Amino acid sequence: MSDSTPNEGNLPASGPAVGRDEWVARHAERRLMRGGRLGAVEERLRAVPWWAWLILFLAAASLMPAVEASGYVRRVGFDTVIFMLLALGLNVVVGWGGLLDLGYIAFFGVGSYAYAIFDSAKFGYHLPSLVSIPLITLFGALVGLVVGLPSRRLSGDYLAIVTLFFLELFETVVLNGDKIAGHDITGGANGILNVDPLNAFGHSLAVQHNGLFAVSYYYMALAMFAIVFVLLRSLNDSRTGRAWRSLREDSLAAEVMGMPVNRLKLMSFATGAGVAALTGTISTALNASVFPLNFSPVVLITIYAMVILGGSGSQSGVVAGAIVVNVLLQVLQNPGQARVLFYLVLVGGVALAFRLSRRLGILVAATLAFGFAVRAVAGAAHRSWVDGAHGGTAHAVSDWVVVPVRMATWVGPTSYGLLLALVLILTVVRSQAGRIALLVPTIYLAAFVWENVMLPNPGPTRYIVLGLLLIVLMVARPNGLLGERRVEIV
Amino acid sequence: MSTFIQLTVDALTLGSVYALVALGYSLVYGVLKLLNFAHGDVFMVGSFIGYGALQALGGPAKPAVPVWLLLVLVTLAAMAGCSVLGVALERFAYRPLRDAPRIAPLISALGASFFISNSMQLLFGAQQRDYQSYLLSGGALYFRGFDVDQVHVPLLRIITIVAAFVLMVVLWWLVNKTATGKAMRATSFDREAAAMMGIDIDRVIVFTFILGSALAGAAGVMFALRVPTFAAVGFTIGLKGFTAAVIGGIGSIPGAMVGGLLLGAAESYTAGYWTTTWSDLVVFTILIAFMIFRPQGLLGRADIRKV
């Protein structure tokens, strides 16, 4: 999938980050074409229309359950599609409208709870899905409209805060919703259980099939994704989409040009909210339950990371971001896979930074030697300092990294803090020799911290990685993987 | 009447903590026009540093130094540690984005907040840390104090409130009476013009972060002297502090103080007279009403934009 249209988005992947004047833009354009075969291939790929990419992607995604039939993989696939949908919705608000909506996840919650209330045994309503899903989507959009109303007078960060408060409000209401004036509406912390599966024309779609997660939900979500993708895409290509973009670039200028700025903001808000609510219905139908904790700020930040990583503003970008981030989170949960990923990233990063040069050789040799030396010293001092690793990759690595059987409590925080300090110093050191000298202990310490502090605690580790990702992306590459380069003309 | 006095003391303690946090938001917003989402987490780190310092000095029951010195040292340690954290945040998460579109530093701040709170959880676990301030000098800080209309006001509360006000006065003096403070005010008025007048903008901004973070550190200790602290507390307190800053008028120093006290009052009176479940709801509703009807806050200037 490529978002490029003939006039925009054709800028190359490398080059200056956030440009500040026209010259930068032109400079980027000059570097557009690669020479030789590679350039020709690149141009060909760009010429492929977006719908061809979409079809290709959908075909590949539909094959996934056939290739790997385990329930776990299906489940992860389904969750990824849900995140893809959520990212598409957030992209409308953040990427196109340029509004920082920190209450986005609450609309997902509104959709989820609305579905759970109207399609479960709790109140005895069992609306057919074909009625409830469109209704709830509309309802979500309406709530978005109402929450967006204050945005008429607010810009930027104030809007962010009002929406964040809306999220807090939503959480408070849902969490205490079992005693609203004596009525139990949301089930409080226990949530709502026994929610109906999706149904059509009297047949309900089973969630489990032979004890295995039913693949039909995966295809359902995928179909929904395709519909939303195409609809949003055509919306973006329309008059409204163009107006949104001008709003994002400079809302004052847009207003001066006679655009109904307030209405446009509300529209983008409501559209995003509607998509989120729609996603909520499918996800709740599959989970058959809904809990307040599903809509915490943690989920919000995860979706933001997806949109930012992929490149806000680009539909294909945020979809790619959703896939990458969700798979990353899954991988990080499994210590074995996480370990492999970590060393791949470490080695890959170093190799990319230094290419094939003598410096790379020196660095690798020095790091390896450093590791073995430290391990030898620690091992000579005390056996239990180096004997705490088991099996597989861990075994190979543990001959190099010090992995104590049990660590004193101060070692974790100290090594972590030291690692942070080293990394931060590295970013400001300019001389090559100094960098290499610092990199050796940094890499070793990173491996130490990873093995001893982070791997045993996958929960916080996942979110630390996400938080870092957001900062580093913003600083290094705000346009994300596939985002369009923004040029601000001052 | 006695309930009222009790609640007023609560309001003052809570409010002074909120005010200190709000000041950090206000200072940074004034100079950088940046909403520092990670500020609440700096506050949380402060309360943890304070806990560490307290334990290092022998714990609350048998401290190695006199109690007054213990309190001062613990607070100073938290303030110093938070200043370092604040400077690091500014240098690595915000400075590279100073000229980027405004949404970029906000997202970076979100990432930083997430990073800090989860790092603390990774290193120190999710469990609560209790200062056990009732053990300080055999509980004297609690059973001593004033009695007003059958209500006992513990000494520790009074110390906290007074210390918060002293810090605020010191801040006011720094900003209004010193050369650096003048540079800060100039920078927040017009950064480019200030730079042209020879003010070192980077230094001013770093100084602002030091001030704001130090106040957050002190607030962290004051908060944790009253109730246990934990790694996720920063989010809520940060939100409350920000609310206070907005109610008072963001960018205005007296505004942040007034906003903090008002918020503390609203929260504790709601909880005392009406409902504890929905007290947050009341706070948020107040904020949203302010956002809509008086976005410049109580003491803030209306934002006039020249094009």
Image (tube, helix red, strand yellow):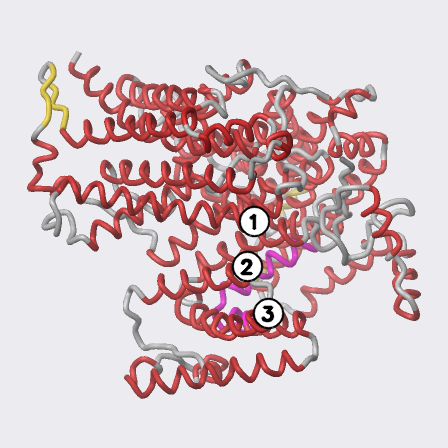
Quarter-wise, where is residue A455 in the image?
bottom left
Along the line of sight, the residue nearer the viewer: B119 or A145: B119
* Residue for point 87% across, 55% down: A52
Separation of residues labelled 2 and 1 (CA atoms): 9 Å
**Is residue B282 located in the magenta-colored stretch of the structure?**
no
* Residue for point 30% across, 43% down: B229
- Mark 2 Cα shell of 10 Å, populated few (<14), some (14-19), many (≥20): many
The reply to whether callout 1 and callout 3 are in contact (CB within 8 Å) is: no
**Is residue A322 located in the magenta-colored stretch of the structure?**
yes
| Residues at discs 1 and 3 both on one chain | yes
Q: Relative to residue A80, is residue A293 depicted above or below?
A: above
* Residue tagged 2: A329
* Residue for point 49% across, 55% down: A464
What secondary structure is the stretch in magenta mostly built from?
helix
Residue A67 pos. (x, y %): 69, 70
Question: Sequence-wise, which precedes: disc 2 or disc 1?
Answer: 1
State the count of labels: 3
Q: Relative to residue B225, is residue A84 depicted above or below?
A: below
| Residues at discs 2 and 3 both on one chain | yes
